[in-house]
Each structure stands twice: as C-alpha cells, then as structure tokens.
Image (cartoon, grey):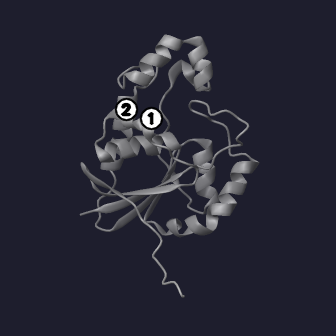
Amino acid sequence: MALRVTFVAAAGSSTVLSERFEDARPLDQAGWHEVQRAAHELLPLAAADLRYCSPAPRSRATGEGLGYAPLVQLALRDCDMGRWRGLTLGEAMAREPEAVDAWLTDPRSTSHGGESLWDFIGRVGGWLDTRPVEDGCRIVAVAEPSVIRAALVYVLKAPPATFWNIDVRSLSTISVAGRAGRWSLRLEGVSAQPTRA
C-alpha cells in the first residue's frame, strides 16, 4: 500500500527582511501576492484526501490562501533553535561563532540549546511514517522550506549534511510516495504537448 505526500513550501516574506531562525512573522503583502500568483497552479492540490500545514504563521496563511483548509501538525514545526530563535545566521555567528560552527558541522550538535539537525530530520520523518496508509491516498502538506529539506533527507536516506545542499523555493512543490520506511522521491513534469511545425 502506498500513499503520496506533496509538500508545498510556504510563501516567503519580503526579500528586504533577513531570514530568521524559527521565523514567526506573518505572511506579508509580498507573500500574499506570491500566493495569489501561484493559486491557479496549486489549487488542484486542495482535492487531496488529507491537507496539513506546519504551525508557522506563513505556512498556515499559505495553506488557507490556497484554499486547502489545512490541519496544523506540530510535528511539521521548524527546527527548535533554542536561544537563536528569531536571529539571522549572521547574528548567531557574531554572538557565538564556535557554537554555530559546531551546529553546522555536527548533525547531533545542540550548541544553541535547541534541537539537533539529526533529531529534526527524525521528527519530520516520523511524521511521514505515521501517515494513514491507504493505497492511493493523497496528502498535501504546507511547510517551511527547512521542514521540506528535512523530509527529503529522510526519504532519500541521505547523510544529514545533505540538508545544507537542498534549496527549496517558496511555493515550490515536491512529492514523495510510499509508506513507513520505504519512501521514494517523485518528480512530476508537465505532460508534453505535440508541437506543430
């Protein structure tokens, strides 16, 4: 029995604002415009059997804006960044350079007083593995890019350091298919239309 989970990356905030750890800012005007522009393409995902989102304000607002009426899942929350919550990477580096280096190089490091990358990937993977298994069940989950990166590392059984090499853009989608412990990345394209000469 297999199911399909499609992740939708939450809309971003204005590019003039720096990315912050565990960013709790709401979706701003630029983000709403992003959602409106992408709604036509992403609206069909509202037909999924189950619709979820992370508790982050931007994820919830993105899901609502796309018409998904998603159920909040605490397991899809961003990595707990402890005392670095709300800081940019540069701000954390200026305050605690050795702690940031340890966190970036050791997936089990909790130098920030929060959750390790290892535990974060395991939490997100655990959420995937506990989805209801009904053959052909379709799930959509709106989440922060870091949550989607963690899911991909888990699905691919890749080394945790792979997390830093995955770029997830706002409102991008990626699907995984399978069941607990047996997941595959699923890349889908637009069906080719014959061209006329």
Location of the N terminus (image quadrant): bottom left
Q: Quadrant of residue 63?
A: bottom right
Placement of 41 over or under 141, stated as above or below: below
Dot 1 falls on a residue whose secondary structure is helix
Dot 2 falls on a residue whose secondary structure is helix
Residue 111 visible, this angle = no
Of the residues shown, which amino acid type is indicated by label 2? Ala
Q: Residue lying farthest right?
A: 29
Q: Which residue is mark 1?
A: 164
Asked whether the beta carbons under mark 2 and mark 1 sit within 8 Å of each other, the answer is: yes
Seen at 41% across and 58% down, the residue is: 175
What whole-number distance in Å separates the C-alpha atoms at marks 2 and 1? 6 Å
Location of the C terminus (image quadrant): bottom right
Q: Which mark is residue 125?
A: none
Seen at 41% across and 37% down, the residue is: 163
Residue 186 visible, this angle = yes
Of the residues shown, which amino acid type is indicated by label 1? Trp
Foreground residue, 182 or 48? 182
Q: Position of residue 7 (x, y in %)?
A: 46, 54
Q: Which residue is mark 2?
A: 161
Seen at 42% across and 60% down, the residue is: 139
**Crowd rating for badge 2 (residues with CA inside 10 Å; few <14, some 14–19, many 20+):** some
Q: Is residue 152 left or right of residue 57?
A: left
